[in-house]
Structure formats: C-alpha cells, structure tokens
Amino acid sequence: PQNEIRLEDYRPTDFVLLTVDLAFDLDPQRTIVTSTIAMARREGVDREAPLTLDGDELEFVSLKINGVDAEPHAVTPDRLEIRGLPATGEFTLEIVTAIAPASNTKLMGLYSTNGVYCTQCEAEGFRRITYFLDRPDALAVYTTTIRADAKAAPLLLSNGNPVDSGVLGDGRHFVAWNDPHPKPSYLFALVAGDLGVVEDDFTTASGRKVKLAIYVEHGKEERAAYAMDALKRSMRWDEERFGREYDLDIFMIVAVSDFNMGAMENKGLNVFNDKYVLADPDTATDADYANIEAIIAHEYFHNWTGNRITCRDWFQLCLKEGLTVYRDHEFSADMRSRAVKRIAEVRLLKAHQFPEDNGPLAHPVRPRKYSEINNFYTATVYEKGSEVVRMIETLLGRDDFKKGMDLYFERHDGDAATIEDFVACFAEVSGKNLDQFFLWYEQAGTPEITVASQYEPSTQTLRLELEQSIPPTPGQSSKQPMHIPLRVGLFESNGEPASPRAIEGIEADGDVLNLRERTHTVRITGVKSRPAISVNRSFSAPVNVRQQQSDRELAQLARIETDLFSRWQALNDLAMRHLVSATQKAESGEAASANRELTDCLCAVLADRTLEPAFRAHAITLPGETDIAREIGNDINPDAIHEAREALVAQIASHGRDLFEEIAAETRPAGDYSPDAASAGDRALYLACMSHLAVASGDPSGPLSLYRSADNMTLLSGALAMLAHRFPRSPEAEEALADFEARYRDNPLVIDKWLTVQATIPGADALSRVKTLMDKPHFQLSNPNRVRSLIGTYASGNPTGFNRADGAGYDFLAGIVIDLDPLNPQVAARLLTAMRSWRSLEAARREKALDTLRKIARVEKLSTDVRDIVDRMIG
Ligand code: DPP
Ligand code: ZN
C-alpha cells in the first residue's frame, strides 16, 4: 500500500523544538503565517542531518535562519528541507507561508465556517498552516499573535492565556496568546470572528478561579447553558474522581457549524461541532442532551489524558482516546443511571465496533501500521479502547486502578507516552503481570467464548468448559489466547445467588474468572441445585459468548439476575435467538411463529414498576437490524431480517396492548421539560409505548396527535419518526413532515433530524427520497453534519433501504464518495465505511457491492483517505 507508516519504524526527531512563535495576518483569501521556531539539533545526531518539515498544500513565501534570508534545500507544497543547520546550539527559523482559509473545504488546518476563522489540527492539519515537525512527540511552548480586521473579527482566540492586545492601522487589531504548557502541534487552535459568548467561572479544588467562556453564533447564547453546566460538572468530577485540576486561567469552547469530528480538545480552546453544544427543549432531544454532556466531558477530560500526557506517535491514539472515553463513560454513569448507561454503551459497541472488528477494516486497538491516520479514529480505538481500560479496572479493583492512574499522571505528566508506559503503571502498583493482557492492544477481532456446563447433583458440582477463540483478521491469521476477565454469576433454582465452596481449574477473583488458556475446565463445588449461569456480567469483557442455554434459563435470568445490565442482556439474547430463527423462516417464506415465552418475559419487565423507566424502555427495544445481521454472520438478507423483526414488534405490540396503554398513561409527560436522566427515562418509555400502540392499532392518528401536542423536541421528533417510519406516505406523515420543515427551516441542526428521519424510512424507496432531499436548499455537500444526517444515516442506518437488491444504494453512495472526495476526503472516507460489512451479505448483493467498490478503486485521483478504505475493503 501507498506510504505505509509502521510502528516499528518510530524514531525520535533529529531536532528538538524549544519555542514556537506564530503570527497570523488573517485574510480569507491570503492569510500570511509567520512561524518563528527556536530549535536545536538533538544531542548525538549526525551534524550533517538535514531538517525536513511537513507541509500540505502550502505556498512557501520565505525562510530566514537566525534572522538571515536563506534558501531551502528543497521546497514543495508538502515538504520543506533545510540543510547546513548549526551542529550544536540553539538556532531560529523564520518560515513564512500563505494559505487561503476561505477555499479550504477539507476543514483541516485553518478554514472559515459561517464567516468565522477556525482551525482543526488533529491529526495532521497543522502542516496545512505552516511547515513544521507535525508529529505528537514534538512539544513546544507556543505564543500566537493574531492580526485581523476588527469589524470582521472582533474576537481573536488561541491557546493559553491572553498576554497582549492592541489596535493596528487600517481597521485591524491584534491579540497575543501564550500557552505555558508544552504541547504538540495537533493541539494548536485559533478562532477569529464575530461571536456571542456565555461566561461563567469555576473555582478549582485548590481555590484558583478559572474563567469559562462558550462562544456561539450571536442569538444562540441561551442554547449554550446546558453545555456550560455540563462543563462545570465535568471539572468538579475530574477533581473528585481522579484528582485532576484545570491548569490555565481560562477555558474556552467555540461552537462551529462546519466540523469534521464531534469536537476537539485543543489546549484551553476546545472547538466543537455546534451539534454538541447547542440545546434547548424546543430544538434538542434527550439524546442530544446526553451527547452534549458526554462530549463536553470527554474533551475537558482530555486536558489531562491527551494534553498534559500526550501520545508519542499516532499508533498510541488509544492511549488518549480509549482512556478518555472510559473517563467520560464513568462520568455519565455517575451523572445518570449506571446500569442504563452500561446498556447504552454495550449497544453502541456491538452496533459499531463488533462489525468493524469482524470485517475487512478490523485492526488492533493499537494498530501497527497505517497509510492514513484519519481512518483510525474508529470505534475500535475509542470504544474497544475504553473497554480495555475498563478490564484493567476489573482486574485490579477500584483502589489499585486509582493508584495506577495516579502513578500514570505523576510519572508521565509532560510526556509523549506509549501504551507500554500506561500499562506498566498498573502492573507496578498491583504487582500483577499484565503481559498477556497486553494482547488486547495488539490482537484484532472479537474473541468468542463458548461455555458448556454440566451439573452433578450428587456432588453438588458444576463443571464449566470454557473455550476462547479469536477469529482471523486482516494481517493476523492466527491468534494467541488472551487474558479475559469474565464475570460469572450462578443462581440456584430458588432464584438466590449461589455461594460456591470452591472454584478450581481457573484463577477466580470474586465473580471474575481469569481466562488465560484456550480452554479451561472449571469445577465449582457447593452449588446446591442446577444453577442458571450468567456469563459476562456487566459486560466485563468485549467478547461474544456462545452458551448452551434454554429459552427458559434465559427467561429465568431475565427475572432474577441481580446485575441489571445482565437482566437486559438475557432479554436481549432471548429476543436475538428468536429473531435469528425468524429470519431464517422469513427467507424460506414461512410465517413467523409467535413466541409466548419471549413476549411474556418482555411484558413482565415492562410491567415491573420497581425497575427504572429508562431500563424498561431499553428492555422492550429489540436488537436492531444490524445487530441481528452481525449475529447471523453471513449470507445476510436485510429484507428477511426486517420482516422478522417487524413481525416480532407486531406480536409484542398486540400481545402487550393493554399494558402499553397503561404504562403510556402512567408516563405521559406533564409539566415543564427537564433534561435530567429520570425525566428522559420516562419519555423514552412513553415513546416506546406510543410506538407499540401505533403498531397495534395500525392507526397514525395516535402519533399525529402526539406530534401536534408535543411541547419539546424529544416528543416531537419521536412522533415524527413513528409517523414517517410506520406510516410512510400517509397524509398524517406528510402533514407532520411538512410542518416540521416549515417550523425549523432556519435551524440546520433541527433540519438534520428531519433529513435523518426520512433517510431511515425502511424499504427500497428510501433512495429516491434521499435523492430528492439532496436537491433541497437545506442540503449542502460541503457541510459534514448535513452529509452525515442524510447520506450517512441512509447508508449505515437503513439496512433495507441501502442494501437494495439492485445495488442502486451502493452505486449512489459511490457517486457521493467520489464527488465529495476532492472537497473533504475525511468525511468521504468515513461515509464509505458504511459498506464495511459487505462480505457478510448474500451472494447477489455481495457481488453488487464488490462491483461498486471496484468502480471506486478505478478512479485515478482518489485521496489517501478513500484509497486506503477502498483498498482494505476489497482486500
Ligand atoms: N477531537 C477528537 C476527540 O476528542 C479527536 N481527538 O476524540
Ligand atoms: Zn477524544
């Protein structure tokens, strides 16, 4: 493959940075960047070694060495080579480049969005601003001076603390910033423009007052209140849970409307996709509020896990991302319901990471090679990376885990560190050997654990045969056994948890079994009756479990498990089992049979008022179509899955109709909207009931009156989805869609919901709907949120609509990817990953998908981003 970068080729830079002084003369068409870098040759490095700096589409203007005009040895838009630099001692480079923010459509480097200048430098965007050692282990203290037109850009922001400002001639002004914390270039940020602000402050545990500011477009200030609240709670939580205080005088967040990612943790100046800042009851759903809380926390937590301790190289991305996701998960669990949060996390992991790990794009949590780093901001690095940290906590226990984190912060503050550095801290504080555990970072693929059990009443002994296997993944055909912490619970026939006398054949630590071999034969004595066995409680390891279990046993676990997550898991497994066999029947044209065991079980949970509403809402939400596809594994026919799932929804709806009526009446929202978790749980349960009632009655008037009476976006968009998905083309659905568009036409983030709802209407018609919507003025190919809301959700959230038997969905996506690639390769490549499970499809669709991928591969001028994805997908 093109330009493959390998972990084993890592070596330190020949030159070290000392300070970086940047000056920006902002202009939309021609911004002049003057970069003054103090640096020195690293000790021991060849005195002749040249200095090579990274660039990307840069216009070189001039170079000075120690204040004297100089000629580079070689210069191109993406590279600057300088020879003859001093053998010893400090020297200064002054490099001048010209860039055009207004025509930067890649949204990497310095670009403009709705008249605001903004930067995105992770991973390799800084080299689109100036020639630099653009790598995470090149740390320096930055000073940044921004000069701009005072009218167009009254606000001039960068990292750190403001140190100077003033008026220049020609209506221009300047502000200078200094960031005392050494940082790599990917954490640099600049924002300039005319924005509104919400201000607050926070007093740290040691009594320092920090100014907080969230910048948004004028008129949207009130919609930043929840983000500010989430920020303050995040700051407090990181002090209390991890002893981490904020370290500058000011912390700023800027919301922009064109952004490739969710948000970016630039030191002291986070830049956010406005989707994850702006919220009020009229425009944001409960899910939006939860996402804002989580992402504000995530970016804030990066200040320690990412910024103070950064990554040595991009192979170590999970060092900051997996760990920071773990931290934001813990924060949300503390803010909300821990069990419900865990269910949502696992649902997400299984929906995104498991398919990735099971397809052509599978890669280890710490990859060993890449040709385009942008393509490794994946569910594996983030979500599986977080699960790996969670397993360390499970293995060590909360106290030793905390000690390990403390040691990590103490030992590596200011470092560009590696996964080895991180794991060593936990091994050291606990005395545990984590060598085998380290394979979680190195071996891709979701491990599968098979569990067979045998109970001997005469000796009151349970025998468990545990076997682990890890499927082959690209570049890794055979795998070594891993160290897997598997929580196992046993419940006796009276429903009580068993209290075994002894566990032999495996190292057990409380309810955690430490799998280390390919197979273990475990003898558990003192089990008084044949137990129900609950495996992988709380999802202690990101694995698939195959267990011989009857429907009755699963139903029993769903009733008696004391771990709420595992109750959900049992229900989900029970439903999954039915859905898989119903899909097979649908494929052979047989009618789906009713499953009383399952529907009774679901209704029992629904009716159990001792359980929190959010949990009950999850419990009656069946596995999604993509989950079912993953479970089936190969020769997938998305239409059959859809048919089977719909049939089960209908059975549940009619079987539980009276109960749904009852619960809907109990949970019907009243009073003012509040985004708190308990109220959101009530609304989730209410909407789930209303949706089942609409199915049971076959009548759109229920959702329509809900739509008409809704006084918040959660209910409004919930009703809209019921109408559009359950009653497409009905006058009721048309009325609601038209009303929604008219009401929110000036609010692009809300229009995104309108696009998504229509893009995900099941069935082959979805394609023509999506094409029509692309012609609407609301849609813009240049805006990532619009593209993801319409095309992204169509391709990855509408299995029947996208996987049309005629392959037209694939060809459509290919057309978009090819059109978007020259504009924004990062978003184009991400869209294409929607096809990552193509090999699991049935033969006819598989062939069509392959044709499409080959068509893309034949395009001559593809970006490295799209080229990398398409090459790996074809394999
Ligand atoms: N901004 C992205 C994140 O926080 C990449 N660092 O995950
Ligand atoms: Zn992150």
Image (cartoon, grey):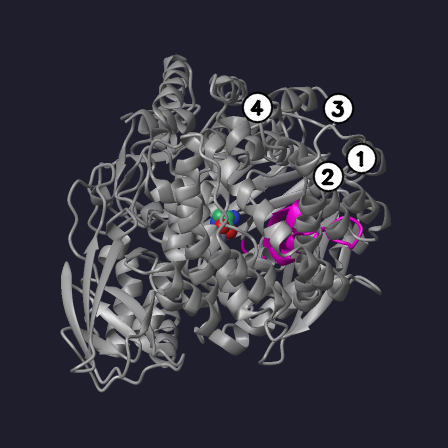
Q: Is tag 3's residue or tag 4's residue first in the polypeptide sequence?
A: 4
Q: Is tag 3's residue or tag 2's residue first in the polypeptide sequence?
A: 2
**What's the residue type where badge 2 is placed?**
Leu
- Residue 807: give x, y in percent of width and height: 47, 18
Which of 668 and 838 lies nearest the eye of the viewer? 668
Which label sits on residue 723? 2
Question: 14 above or below 778?
Answer: below
Q: Which residues are magenta?
A: 266-292
Identify the residue shown where x is 35% and y is 78%.
Answer: 493
Instruction: Please say whether residue 283 is one of the residues in the magenta stretch.
Output: yes
**Label 4 crowd (10 A; few <14 / some 14-19 / many >=20):** many
Which label sits on residue 777? 3
Which label sits on residue 257? none
- Residue 578: give x, y in percent of width and height: 43, 49
Q: CA distance from mark 1 to mark 3?
A: 24 Å
Q: Which is in the foreground here, disc 3 or disc 2?
A: 2
Circle 3 — which element? Answer: loop
Q: Which is in the foreground here, disc 1 or disc 3?
A: 1
Q: Give the residue number, with chain letter if any, for mark 1.
A: 732
Q: Give the residue number, with chain letter if any, for mark 4.
A: 764
